[in-house]
């Protein structure tokens, strides 16, 4: 998996074809990663997002990156965690699959993901991480021409967990 990179970094600073925004259904900005991406990209991102008519949980939409180093932002809406038995794992997996599919459809070759749904949406990191890794690895196995997938971890704990799971 030399095309998968785990980093402890601010996703808004990464120079890739697209960064993934863990958005809310309105796509109009919010807290956490979503707010940080909107602030870094500038008001043009919000203006473009207003034209997209929101996004359903598990789906993904793409915009330009504006003031970011990333050329595009892929917005996906992760599930709010309840108990793990309300379809959350399937919806979280769909976020990764649909974001990666959108990258391919748009001819992109590098993408960076945050830890979707693990912030205010309450998805336990220990449950979300294996889902994310499974989806990313399956994608890379079937897309040999895709150059790189980065997982941008917000904390040392998240980074350490990802690194541990990639070694298994």
Image: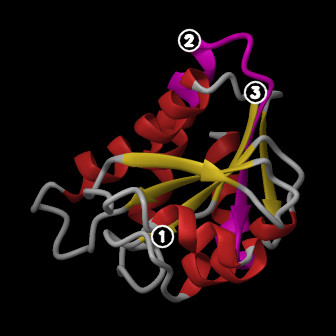
Q: Position of residue 152 (x, y in %)?
A: 73, 61
Q: Is residue 79 magenta?
A: no
* Mark 1 element type: helix
**Which callout, 1 or 3, points to the residue nearer the camera?**
3
Q: Position of residue 75 (x, y in %)?
A: 50, 56
The quadrant in which the N terminus is found is top right
Give how far apart the Cα atoms at labels 1 and 3 are: 27 Å
Q: Residues within 10 Å of mark 2 (few under 14, many from 20)?
A: few
Report the mark closest to the observer, 3 or 2.
3
Q: Earlier in the sequence, mark 3 or mark 2?
A: 3
Numbered tag placed on residue 159 in the rendering? none
User: For mark 3, what is the residue?
Assistant: 109
User: At x 34% / y 72%, what residue is drawn?
Assistant: 26
Quarter of the image for residue 69 reads: bottom right
Disc 2 element: helix
Left or right: where 69 falls relative to 95: right
Label 2 sits on residue: 142
Whether 166 is drawn above or below 143: the answer is: below
Colouring rule applied to residues = secondary structure
Circle 3 SS class: loop
Q: Residue at x 25, y 56 (%)?
A: 56
Per the rendered image, the range of residues in magenta is 137-160
Q: How far apart in space, not on screen, are marks 2 and 1 (Cα)?
A: 26 Å
Residue 80 placement: quadrant: bottom left
73, above or below 34, in the image: above
- For residue 39, side relative to residue 141 (left or right): right
Of tags 2 and 1, which is closer to the observer?
Answer: 2
Q: Nearer the viewer, residue 43 or 39?
A: 43
Q: Position of residue 83 (x, y in %)?
A: 16, 73
Q: Which mark is residue 125?
A: 1
Which residue is nearer to you in this view: 63 or 139?
Answer: 63
Would you say residue 153 sits in the magenta stretch?
A: yes
């Amino acid at each position: 998996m030399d095309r998968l990179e785990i980093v402890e970094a601010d996703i808004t600073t990464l120079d890739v074809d697209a960064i993934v925004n863990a958005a809310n259904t309105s796509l109009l900005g919010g807290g956490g990663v979503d707010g940080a991406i909107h602030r870094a990209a500038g008001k043009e991102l919000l203006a473009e997002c207003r034209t997209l008519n929101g996004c359903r949980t598990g789906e993904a939409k793409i915009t330009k990156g504006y003031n970011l180093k990333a050329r595009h932002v892929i917005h996906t809406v992760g599930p709010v965690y309840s108990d793990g038995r309300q379809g959350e794992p399937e919806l979280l997996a769909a976020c990764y699959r649909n974001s990666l599919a959108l990258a391919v459809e748009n001819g992109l070759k590098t993408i960076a993901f945050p830890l979707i749904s693990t912030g205010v949406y309450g998805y336990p990191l220990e449950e979300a991480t294996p889902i994310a890794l499974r989806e990313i690895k399956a994608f890379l196995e079937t897309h040999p021409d895709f150059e790189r997938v980065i997982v941008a971890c917000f904390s040392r704990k998240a980074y350490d967990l990802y690194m541990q799971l990639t070694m298994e």
